[in-house]
Amino acid sequence: MDMDEGRPGVAATLRALNGALGRPAALWVKESGARNLRHRDFLAPRAALSAAFPGGQGWRSPVHVQPRPLLALRPQVPPEAVSAVLSLRGPAVLPLRVCRQTPAGLVVQVRRPEAFQRLLGPLPDPASPAAGARTDCVVLHCPALRSPAALRLRHLRSVLVADHLAQLLRAQGVSVRLVPALSEERSWDVLRKLRIYWPSGSCVSSLTDAVSALKVALGRCPCAAACEQGPGTAEGVICKVHLKSFVEQQGLLGYDPNLDVLLGEPHIYNSSGVAVGSGLNLGQTQWCGVENPMSHCVSLHLSVTEGTLQSLAELQEAVLQCPVSDPIAPPASRFPSVLPFCQAKGQSSSCSIVHVVNCEEEFQLQQLDVLWRILDPGAHTALQKHLICGPVKVTNPSSPIGADQYFQLRKHQMYEASVIKYGELAQDEAWTEVIDTLTVAAIRFELLSTAHRSQITLDLENNSISTKGTKSGAFVMYNCARLATLFNAFQQAVKQGEHQPHHPPRRPLLEPQGLLWAQQSPCFPGTYPPLPPVSELNFSCLREEGEWLLLFNYLLPFPEVLQQAAQLPPSSKGIRITANTETVCKFLIQLSMDFSSYYNRVHILGEPFPHLFDQMFARLQMLGAVRDVFHSALATLHLPPLSQI
């Protein structure tokens, strides 16, 4: 099922187009460029058609003209297939008006007025979830928040990715549990400033029984060895566990082969049980005078501490708190493709664990993952996946910079940039909240616009932050505020019209400066009536290419964009997964650029002549939908829309 059944969608239309040609392959693509959209909306490229319909007829050319190789054969698409394309119907399929063969391939154009009507008009109420439907739950674990040290930029990136992913999943009806709970013993002020709403509270006392149960499991574990305190033994170690042997026995893929050697608190012991080195200082270890010390080592072990077991107990508690539906009910989900990796066969509900961690601490996470599998061999531990965030580099840093310093620096730079652009207005106290929001937007877009697995390089110089750049969070917030200003101006004009008799202006404002004045100050003699019901609007008035661009590239695919951003695809091998956490930021940036271009070119609130109202009302309805898209997308980033800048 594609989103709401009564709403046209890109995926449903593409499936219908492919089905009409009677070929299983995906032949059609959606156009997105402004130049191509003037002539076609969907294209089945010539090369794909030639492969699907071999035996095309040659294009005859004069003998003295050498035919171009790419145009030598024309795919022979059966006429009945073309007719089938034009006859496509369905609640989720866009209305089509033209299907013809061109040198580029088979092209289709959409009936635009009907598409506007169906996308901007009232939609049927979404069906309520069926009783006993599958309840999916995801536990998002962010180990960076367990560190007692101040957050670094690499930690902040993984926290922002987890926070954004949680919002995306919730928007798809998925229950999300965030782990760990923030300790009350330290300040998390920077998270509050960045609008990261992470659960807090001390849960150590409530986990006592769970930790005790894990200790019992350790005592029964064949991979574990008792630990006797002595020289070379780290303080607080309960026992030692051989992780590598378990990974090999279970045939687990994607884990580092040196799980017992590096990082964490691994130790190497000789045949007498004396510690001869650890993963942190193997290069400096004295090997008891033997030529090949490894041949005299019993095994390599990972030391398990009380803190390690508390971390596992908290993860177990989060899994137990995930909602579970009736196990007898048949599997059902409103968004069945969001979490394919966590749907075990025969389950009517599922709970999966996604560890979000930076690449520098991935190894320690693998150790925790394997230890949990050993102590709790349930279905949920087998569904653990790792979402790895790439490094965050800073150009020419004078010293290491923490998350709090980074926020303060960007806030100061945003304030300076606002003063340059808006002058004394930016120094008003009312601007404090605006600048805070712009700072959060700048940081979130800076750290989330890049694919999570890729490296980010930050330039912390003053000229790297701007309110004018078209690829920044501030630019997105600015365009969102422009829409708010537009609708506020319209509503003020409507209210004025309710208290005055409606009459035309004393003279027509035909000069460019008059039209500009009408755009910016609509409260001139003769104001607007209220926006009519959507069923009374005439969408055939929307003839600007920029209007179709906004609908076709943004309003139409937006629900599918959110769904794709929340997808956690299955991994064929190993434990790593990737998510499209950069999708929403990139979508908002591109939307802002195309909306800004349209808004700068087209007058929305024009002269109050009745014969112009149809077009103005249709445009307001369309821009109201654009505003809703802005608000919904920003909500996944915990960014409130600004009413003015």
Image: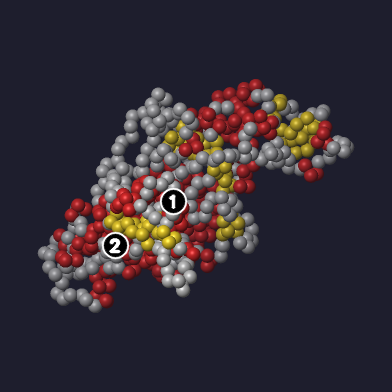
Quarter of the image for the C terminus: give it. bottom left
**Can residue 612 be seen in this snapshot?**
yes
Q: Is residue 42 left or right of residue 535?
A: right
**Label 1 crowding class (10 Å Cα cut-off): few <14, some 14-19, many 20+?**
some
- The residue indicated by pointer 1 is 52
Q: Position of residue 371 (x, y in %)?
A: 62, 32
Q: Position of residue 43 (x, y in %)?
A: 39, 57
Where residue 445 sits: x, y (%)? Answer: 48, 56
On the image, numbered disc 2 is attached to which residue?
A: 486
**Foreground pick, 569 / 29:** 29
Query: SS at mark 2?
Result: helix
Q: Nearer the viewer, mark 2 or mark 1?
A: 1
- Looking at the picture, tell me which residue is in the foreground, 643 or 176: 176
Residue at image position (21%, 67%) is 523
Q: Position of residue 98 (x, y in %)?
A: 30, 58
Q: Residue at x 87, y 38 (%)?
A: 291
Label 2: few (<14), some or many (≥20) within 10 Å?
many
Q: CA distance from mark 2 to mark 1?
A: 50 Å
Q: Which quadrant holds the N terminus?
A: top left
Point 18% across, 54% down: residue: 536
Q: Is residue 140 left or right of residue 370?
A: left
Q: Which amino acid type corresponds to the residue marked 1 in the rendered image?
A: Ala
Quarter of the view holding residue 114: bottom left
- Amino acid marked by disc 2: Leu
Count of marks placed on residues? 2
Label disc, if present, on residue 334 of the rendered structure: none
| Residue 475 visible to the viewer | no
